[in-house]
Image: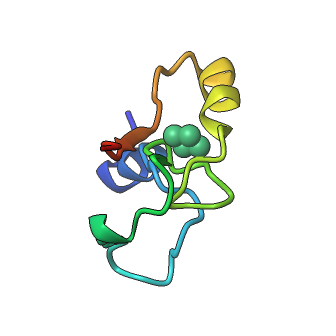
Amino acid sequence: FLPKKKKQRDCLINLKIQKENPKVVNEIDIEDLRSTNVCYCRCWRSKTFPVCDKSHIKHNELTGDNVGPLILKKKTL
Ligand code: FES
């Protein structure tokens, strides 16, 4: 049986991104999207966080997880 604090540490999702901040928040103005598809990381493993760099593929292979990006699509008129 592990102490409660040790258990919580083992469950960290964010291992290295902006650890100096109490909370990681990213704000994106939808009007500033340049391309028609933009992928945002939800696995917290991207080297270009908050943008997905496909690191989730390796993470899923190693852990058996099933995470993937949030994809924002801009309608073309
Ligand atoms: Fe994190 Fe793709 S790299 S969701």
Give the residue displayed 50% in from the left and 21% down from the top.
65
x%, y% of residue 16? 59, 64
In this rendering, the answer to whether 75 lies above or below 32 is: above
Q: Position of residue 70 (x, y in %)?
A: 38, 40
| Residue under the image location 62 percent in, 51 percent down | 46
Residue 28 visible, this orientation: no
Q: Residue furthest bottom?
A: 20
Residue at horizontal 68 percent and vertical 23 percent from the top: 62
Q: Is residue 49 visible?
A: yes
Residue 74, x across and y down, in percent: 34, 47
To which quarter of the image does residue 24 belong?
Answer: bottom left
Q: Nearer the viewer, residue 63 or 43?
A: 43
Q: Nearer the viewer, residue 46 or 51?
A: 51
User: Which image quarter is the N terminus in?
Assistant: top left
Ligand 1 - quadrant of the structure image? top right
Height in image: 54 above or below 5? above
According to the image, what is the colour scheme of the structure?
Answer: rainbow
Quarter-of-image position of residue 71: top left
